[in-house]
Amino acid sequence: MKSRMNFKGPAFLAAGVFFVFLSCATSPKASQDVDNSVRSGSYDSALAVLNNEKSKTRKTNYPPKNEILLYLDRGMISHYAGQYKDSSQDLETAEILIEEAFTKSISQAIGSYILNDNTKEYAGEDYEDLYINVFNALNYYHNDSLEGALVEIRRLNEKLNFLQDKYQRASKKVLDENKQIDPSQLPMEASRFSNSALARYLGVLFYRGTGRNDSARIDYNELRQAYALAPEVYSNPIPSSLEGELSVPQGKGRLNVIAFTGLSPIKEAENIVVPLPLPPPNNFARLEFPKMVNRVNAVKRVEVVLDNNERFDLELVEDMGAVAMETFKSKRGLIILKTTLRSIIKNTGGAVAATAVARQTDEGIGLLVGIAGKVFTEVSEKADIRLSRYFPSQALVGGINLDPGSYNVTVNFYGSSGLVFSERKEVVVRERTLNLEEFFCLK
């Protein structure tokens, strides 16, 4: 009896640890080729890797449970490559799957993913779901559909209205069903993000482009309100060019330029000790939770130069990385709640098993089983660090009134040591319409 127990305890633990590693998240190393292509502006090369089902990146980072990630990453890179219809198709598919996955996740019991969050389908982050609509709006604009673009902006604003109580209701459900958790002892924060200055800025442009100046003014005021409501996100001043967006002089055309720089944050694992409502030694657990970390953005300043000797700097309208981190706060609180509850279930099971073994054999073996169960609990709780990799980090904007006609526009991206990247386009500026140009430097 004793020898069988000594064999089964480590065997079960080893099997559990093996399954944990089978369920691990995406591999940053498998993303290096695509990362390098995106940072260098070789978007077609990046798409070739993502479209190749036999590539290491595709096999490692995009299994069926990471389907949403594939559509997000490919949709964003397609946008940078100017493949706007392909981008819309992927982003719209991702949006549908995110909604379905969230609906499924809030109805799931804790036991349905008792090992860790990596065993579930990736359900998307809130900032990903929001920025889907921003870039799909730009896709529609490039496909000559301002009405379609406005639909996307309105969808984003509807999501923001829902975002306020989305995780409060989910967290309340967990707490109501599990009274043993004291949330005041857990490192939880709530997001205060409720309005997107970038979305409102695009709303101003799209409404103005369709001649709806009253609606454009509403979004103009909402943009200013966004800065006032979330100083944690909007520490920068409101772009000075915003003042000129609602009053383009008669006989002039307005050229608007938007530049996206850097790449969005990634997730890393963070170890946290959380208290558990159990007797010692099971009264605490050392668990892993995901946290967002910014990636380096090489661009410090963006300048627009026209061939008529006009020049101006673009100004930050939204730190998209800050939005990603702020919107993740509420979801992270729910993750902490659910992870803590899973740990209680596992530790309680381990303590019960240890007591049973001690009664059937001796206290020493029971202690070993208890220790093995505690180790398994901590090892099995691997943080879910899955995340899309190719949303930008910052959005910068500017505008200038010009005589209608053709212009050569050069956008220079400067880093701390000088010019990082430069792109030139020939653009046609027309009167009484929207003349919006996009530029990217994702280094």
Image (cartoon, rainbow, N blue to C red):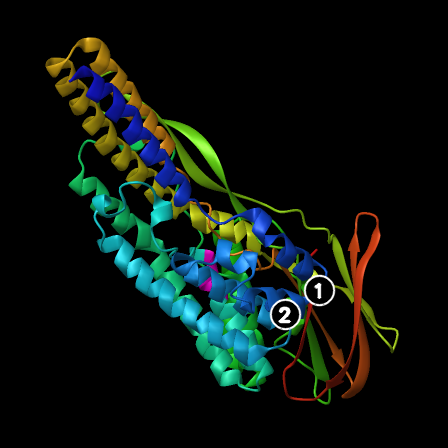
Which quadrant does the N terminus fall into? top left
Which residue is located at x 34 percent, y 31 percent?
A: 14
Let me know if residue 185 appears in the view.
no
- Residue beneath label 2, please? 80
- Residue beneath label 1, please? 41
Work out how far the residue at label 2 is from the one at label 1, CA to CA, in angstroms: 8 Å
- For marks 2 and 1 on the same chain, the one whose residue lies earlier in the sequence: 1
In the image, residue 188 above or below residue 69: above
Which quadrant does the C terminus fall into? bottom right
Which residue is located at x 55 percent, y 77 percent?
A: 139
Q: Is residue 60 left or right of residue 258?
A: left
Residue 94 or residue 180, whichever sits in front? 94
Task: Report the amino acid beneath label 2.
Answer: Tyr
Q: Residues within 10 Å of mark 2 (few under 14, many from 20)?
A: many
In the image, residue 256 above or below residue 1: below
- Dividing the picture into quadrants, the one containing residue 107 is bottom left
Q: Is residue 135 left or right of residue 42?
A: left
Q: Is residue 402 left or right of residue 167?
A: right
